[in-house]
Image (cartoon, rainbow, N blue to C red):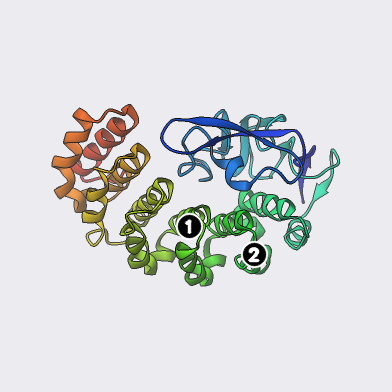
Amino acid sequence: MFRFDGDLFGNASGGAHEGADDSADVCCSDDACSFKAAIKTSGERGKAGEIGHGGFSSQGGFSGQGGVSGHGGFSGHGSGHEGNGHGNVHGGYGGHAGHEVTVADLAARLASRKARDRWTAADALAKLGPKAVEAVPDLVRGLQDEDVDVRCAVARALGHMGDAAQNVVPELARLLRDDDDGVRWGAAEALGNLGKRAASTVSQLLEALQDEDEEADVQAAVASALGKFARDDVPSAPFVPDLIALLVEQEWIVRRSAAEALGRCGKEAQRAVPDLSRIASNDIRPEVKKAAESALEAILTNTRA
């Protein structure tokens, strides 16, 4: 069992972001708040949700070994705290303070008639990661959900299930062609988090990059996924040229993700050194410059960022 203190279903707010810099607040009350709005913060949608690296709030997020940290934690108005792998969340899931929630409870919530119940349950399961493997069959069914936020949340949750989700890789890859950009983003992120278990999808991820009309955060998620493959010892030579091509994209989040991914390719990204050197010196965004500098260091020292 794990404990969620408080109520996620009311009085929660999060930052939404469309584009490079313009942000707006989204109020999460009743069924009005979407999963995508709840996790898109400060232009970091493509960065959020990796356990141990980032989070769901611009003021905090995943920390440690799967818990939640930061002001607002998971629920906007509740105070979060550093996680210890047990899923403790202040201002979190339940509806009654101190309610003990099991994986089975969350899996059952995936069948709720309310879309918001379904995506919040999927998100809670994502935080538990491999501890929630018994819910994988229920999550897989959710990939067919009619609600785009549920499909997105379920895909992301499966990306945290490790070996238990390996057989689901083809279905996640199929979502790279979903009509909704949020679902495509969630699928790309999930594949990246599965690492070499999803290495068979490299060609499909590269195909997603060929769409000139694709949303920037989807492109960034695809680039990040390829970088995670490289970090997981998947041969990166086939996709290094595609990552280099992203370094000239208009949206800075794409350039940054491409630079980070190239750094994870190590010596196989030697051909990217001139382009990375250029943006390390000249890019207008400090985030991109920093990513390029780190990538250059990783490549030139034959390490992986």
Judge left or right: residue 238 versus residue 169.
left
User: Secondary structure under badge 2?
Assistant: loop
Between 202 and 64, the residue placed more toward the observer is 202
Between 199 and 203, the residue placed more toward the observer is 203
Q: Which of the 4 image quarters holds residue 291?
A: top left
The amino acid at mark 2 is Asp
Which residue is label 1 attached to?
184
Q: Which of the 4 image quarters holds residue 63?
A: top right
Residue 205 rendering spot, x and y as whole percentages: 37, 61
Residue 122 rendering spot, x and y as whole percentages: 66, 55
**Residue depicted at x 55% and y 55%:** 156
The amino acid at mark 1 is Arg
Which residue is label 2 attached to?
145
Dot 1: within a 10 Å radius of its alpha carbon, few (fewer than 14), some, or many (20 or more) residues? many
Between 215 and 53, the residue placed more toward the observer is 215
Residue 46 rendering spot, x and y as whole percentages: 46, 44
User: Secondary structure under badge 1?
Assistant: helix
